[in-house]
Image (cartoon, rainbow, N blue to C red):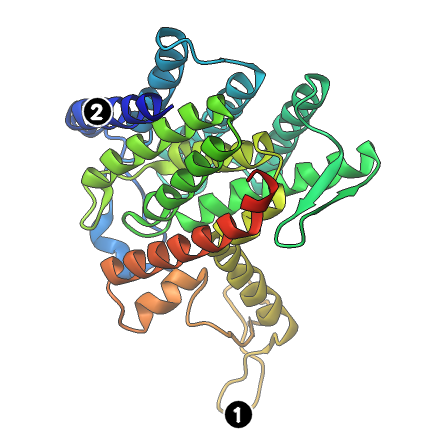
Amino acid sequence: MTTMIAVSVIASFLITAAIGPALIQYLRNMHFGQKILSYVPEHAGKQNTPTMGGFMFIISITVVTLAVSLTLAAPFGIQSVTVLLLSLCYGVIGFIDDRTKIRKAENEGLTSGQKFALQLVLALIFLTVLHRGGYLLPSLYIPFVGVSLEIPWLIYVVIAAFIMVGCNNAVNLTDGLDGLAAGVTLPVSVYFIVIGVISNNVPVVVFASALAGGLAAFLIFNFNPAKVFMGDTGSLFLGGAVAGLAFACDQPLILVFVGFIYVVETLSDIVQVAYYKATKKPVLDENGNPVRDANGKIKMEGKRIFKKAPIHHHFQLCGWSEKKIVLIFAGITVVMCILAYFGVAPRYL
């Protein structure tokens, strides 16, 4: 298994690094540049940086996962197929979103409703295939406690589908600074390599190793200052990969630990929006009269807990550099992955 890990990591790294420059140039030639939101002025200098760079690691992960499984006679079972296909399908949703943004020349692609519906359908298909194949039982393993909670399949599939969709969107939300999503997901992929080894789950080991190698090489081009962004194409692929690996290992609740940064990013956004709406009041002029906009509507303003959400923007406005935020968030993820290992290792050792 050590050979498979080494070959998968190195091959994925080399393929991503090799195709990176050509892909970036192609994206530039096609004018596939990222449009920066008007309310994120601190990123104005990144306007038109090539996006959809996630293709470089998507290609390498797909090629390596298939090639290693076939040439090294790894048991390329339903887990490998479904996790890879799930990730690719989520990547397709991201690609459609990216292309829509480019075509509209703005930073708004698919609606949240369209994304949610597509993500939910894919999650249900993935869970059903794993369940029918006998790789997924309607039980939730509780880390550190060491027990599995048996629940009815219909209830389980609803919970599981929302965990998957939530994870997918959380990774997408984390992709807001140079190298952040890739830097945080890299240690998560290493965690699943380790879990795959101790549980003798070879398909998971191969896919997670290819994921780790591809992300490590992608950071060469994506770390601050980024030469390319992964786009929703890359971030939704990663969200599908992380969620898929968690369910392929039958430990979805571990996402709370290994995906701690994803969770914090998402919660910071939810809390910010909820608090803003709860405290919203009319804006008054110096005479105490409501201020109206150009359409005659009264302007409303609420309070904020963070300077800006998600939370990486808050730290950025506190004066932290992008590099500092990425390194600290990645470091926190490493610590949480180590903690997660001790929470599930007794299940296999």
Res 345 quadrant in image:
top right
Q: Does dot 2 land on a helix, a strand or a loop? A: helix
41 horizontally vs 338: left or right: left
Picture residue at 52% right of the left edge, 43% below the top: 169
The amino acid beneath tag 1 is: Asn
Residue 156, image x and y in percent?
A: 76, 37
Frontmost of labels 1 and 2 is 2
50 horizontally vs 52: left or right: left
Q: Is residue 234 shown above or below 253?
A: above
Q: Which mark is residue 287?
A: 1
* Circle 1 crowding by C-alpha within 10 Å: few under 14, some 14–19, many from 20: few
Residue 264, image x and y in percent?
A: 50, 60
Q: 290 or 346, which is in the foreground?
A: 346
260 horizontally vs 52: left or right: right
Q: Which residue is mark 2?
A: 23
Picture residue at 67% right of the left edge, 54% below the top: 145
The amino acid beneath tag 2 is: Leu
Residue 324, image x and y in percent?
A: 25, 62
